[in-house]
Image: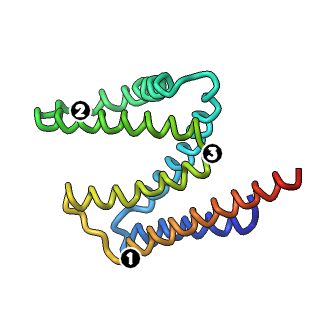
Amino acid sequence: ATVVQWFFLLTAFMGVYVAKGIEGSIPLLDVGIGILGAALSGMSYNAIRQLKDTDPPLRVVFYFPLMTVFIAAPFAFSNWVWPTFDQWLFILALGLFTWLAQIFMTKAYQQGPPGVVNIVGYTGIFYAAFFGYILFEEKLTLLHSFGILIMLVSVVTSTWISQANERKNKKKV
């Protein structure tokens, strides 16, 4: 990574901070956990890319959640509360949409360059805001929107610079 890319990475984190809200509506610990989750996701996306020659997408999608069950089960059972019927319907819908998203994401990461796939993945921020508004009446302030914009511009610019550097290096070879 170049110095310019590191600059845009730091700028993206500043966008997360601005989107989080200066008033502190989201605890900083939660933001840190989200950043850690993003870093771990990045590592898993690279692992998915490496599996493209040996494992079809459905196998990858099967094993990723299977490993999660073993890791999460002790925490879930220690705090278990039986869901209501309506909650079970929501859980089933959530599981179905997550499964479909994981299949499409796995295929995308196995077929395309991770940098390009990742850019498209950031449109999820807009979908999350849209569905949060429609389904849960969540409101985005101008400050939150500005933070999301800073983050998206930073990530897209950094990825664009990375791809330009890759093309330049390929021409040298």
The label shown at residue 72 is: none
Q: Quadrant of residue 91?
A: top left
Nearer to me, 162 or 12: 162
First in residue order: circle 2 vs circle 1: 2
Q: Nearer the viewer, mark 3 or mark 1?
A: 3
Nearer to me, 65 or 81: 65
Hey, what amino acid is under mark 1?
A: Leu
Hey, what amino acid is under mark 2?
A: Leu
Task: Give the residue at x 57% y 67%.
Answer: 154
Q: Nearer the viewer, mark 3 or mark 2?
A: 3
Q: Residue furthest bottom?
A: 142
Q: Which residue is mark 2?
A: 92
Q: Quadrant of residue 130?
A: bottom left
Spatial CA span between label 3 and label 1? 32 Å
Hey, what amino acid is under mark 3?
A: Pro
Q: Which residue is mark 3?
A: 113
Q: Residues within 10 Å of mark 1 (few under 14, many from 20)?
A: some
Nearer to me, 131 or 91: 131
- The image position of residue 137, as x and y in percent, is 19, 62
Nearer to me, 69 or 63: 63
Q: Residues within 10 Å of mark 2 (few under 14, many from 20)?
A: few
Spatial CA span between label 3 and label 2? 32 Å
Q: Quadrant of residue 40?
A: top right
Task: Give the residue at x 35% y 56%.
Answer: 127
- Badge 3 element: loop
Q: CB under 8 Å between callouts 2 and 1?
A: no
Q: Which residue is mark 1?
A: 143
